[in-house]
Amino acid sequence: MGAVRMDEKMLNKELMAKVSRKFYGHTNLYSKYTPKIPEGAEREYIRMVNEYTGILKEELEAEFPTLKEIYKRERDAEVQGRREDSATDFLLAVIGIFNRIRNKVAARCLSFGLKKRLSNLALINRRMTTKEWEKVIRTSLGIDIRKDYYLGDFYLDQLAKWVSENVDLITSIPENTLDKMKDIVLDGFNRGRRTTDIAKDIQLAYGVSRKKARFIARDQTAKLNGQIQRAQQMDAGITEYIWSDCGDERVRRSHRRLNGQKFSWEGEGPETDNGRHCHPGQDFNCRCIGRPVFNRNTLNLPVKEDSGIKVTIK
């Protein structure tokens, strides 16, 4: 794959000497640059899930007047003791409305192209993460790596798995939300709740689903970034990293405690909350980064061909 080991002759002696000098006689070299989370990919994911959950809102708003009318009519009849049909008829009517909403949402979501959009998001994430990796190598070692190595087949299995998992996560949101809304209506009817109260709870349920979708977008963007970052570093012969948090008030206490400490990429990672173990980016909504620790004896990087090598000495 055009990989270059520092103890082999695939790099010319001048390049080897210049890279070696970056270590100042030490075995390890701590990265001078901390990679950033791909915020552009996160924003695009949030925009996409907002559009996706908007389909549910539109179809719900189209059917809600009918649902409201049936609920109010049946509720008034129940209170006034003039019901002419059974509660089963109301149950079937509500189920019918929600099934109709479900079918319309499913049809529109099918044409939404969710898998394709997620695949594009995965590629955006990979491109941004690779750009940050280039900065790490250039800043720390003074060499330029081959982008084609990282933008080719290297991560395809990881990307495909991520896309599949995210399709399941996103498509479950309308299904679960509609089930929740149906339960709100039926439970409210049994408890004698007013139509206005039911409407408020349905609106709240939609708000929760929208927040969940945004959470998934942020969480999954960070997770993919962490997976790619770990693969990049381990492929380069890097076995250790420095845990680096984002340095703001959103950092959880257990992750702030790990900040600045050195850990191995092998295994399940250091202990965080409640005995859980993870590497940067693996925990829920974790925005932490693993800053690489280069080892001159194991370094293995795909650099540009000899004729195209650019060396920067700082």
Image (cartoon, rainbow, N blue to C red):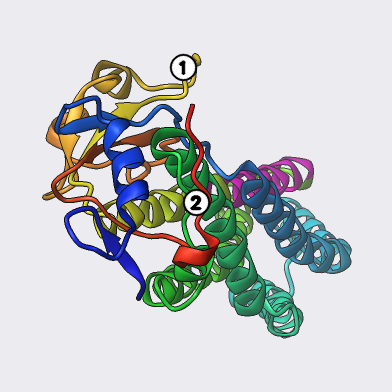
**Mark 1 closeness class: few <14, some 14–19, many ≥20 residues within 10 Å:** few
**Residue 90 locus on image (x, y percent):** 67, 72
Kind of residue sitting beneath label 1: Gly
Front residue of 104 and 191: 104
**Residue 237 locus on image (x, y percent):** 21, 53
In the drawing, does residue 153 fall left or right of residue 135? left
Residue 55, numbered label: none
Measured along the vertical axis of the image, is residue 278 above or below residue 235?
Answer: above
Query: Which span of residues is magenta-colored?
Result: 196-215
Q: Quadrant for the N terminus, please.
A: bottom left
Question: Which residue position is annotated with label 2?
Answer: 144
Name the element at disc 1: loop
**Mark 2 closeness class: few <14, some 14–19, many ≥20 residues within 10 Å:** many
Measured along the vertical axis of the image, is residue 244 above or below residue 236?
Answer: above
Question: Which residue position is annotated with label 1?
Answer: 247
Front residue of 226 and 190: 226
Could you tell me if residue 24 is visible in this image?
A: yes
Kind of residue sitting beneath label 2: Asp
Q: Which residue is at 30% across, 62% downward?
A: 4
